[in-house]
Amino acid sequence: MKFNYDDNFLYFYSILLRSYKEFSANGLKEFDLSPIEIEILKFLINNGKYFKTAKDIVTYKGVSKALVSKGVNDLIESGYLVSEVSKEDKRISNLFITAKADPIVEKLKKINEDFSKSIFENIPMEDIDGLKATQKKMLHNLQKIKLY
């Protein structure tokens, strides 16, 4: 793959996300999951403590409601997710990963670890820390202009 950065960080991030999705899909072939099912599971693994509804997935992943709904239903049917009505608000259903999905969860954690090792190879920790600090500042700036 030829990559022409030319100071276009949005292009860089699109390459990074596409590469991560492909890396994840390749690592999970044995489970026969669709791309949206993988994205739903990754979202809940990484954010399930605070964001656990289909609406959260639609909002933060930028995926259509219909696609998320189908993926959630397929994961529930497979026994990898359960949906429970919120105790605080009966209009909301929270999604939880089941024990049946433990092998997938463990594999995804390993995939995340391997992907991170690959992309940060030969990069000094102070550069990685600087990148993280810069990303936090960028998110803060987006919050100030109400885009995030």
Image: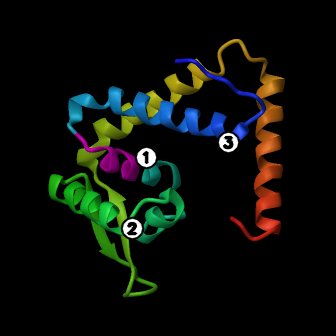
Q: Amino acid at mark 1?
A: Lys
Marks 1/3 in contact by CB < 8 Å: the verdict is no
Q: Residue at x 46, y 85 (%)?
A: 88
Q: Residue at x 37, y 40 (%)?
A: 105
The crowd level at tag 3 (other Cα within 10 Å; few <14, some 14-19, many 20+) is few
Residue under label 1: 42
Q: Which residues are magenta?
A: 33-42
Q: Measured from the top left, where is residue 39 in percent x and y? A: 40, 48
Q: Measured from the top left, where is residue 43 in percent x and y? A: 46, 52
The crowd level at tag 1 (other Cα within 10 Å; few <14, some 14-19, many 20+) is some
Considering every residue shown, the one lying at the far left of the view is: 77
The disc, 1 or 3, on the residue closer to the chain's N-terminal end is: 3
Quadrant of the image occupied by residue 6 = top right
Q: Residue at x 37, y 87 (%)?
A: 90
Q: Does residue 111 lie above or below 40 as drawn?
A: above
Residue under label 2: 54
Q: Does residue 55 lie above or below 40 as drawn?
A: below
The disc, 2 or 1, on the residue closer to the chain's N-terminal end is: 1
How far is the residue under mark 1 from the one under mark 3?
A: 22 Å
The disc, 2 or 3, on the residue closer to the chain's N-terminal end is: 3
Q: Amino acid at mark 3?
A: Leu
Give the foreground label among 2 and 3: 3
Q: For residue 14, which numbered disc appears in the image?
A: none
Considering every residue shown, the one lying at the far bottom of the view is: 90
Residue under label 3: 10
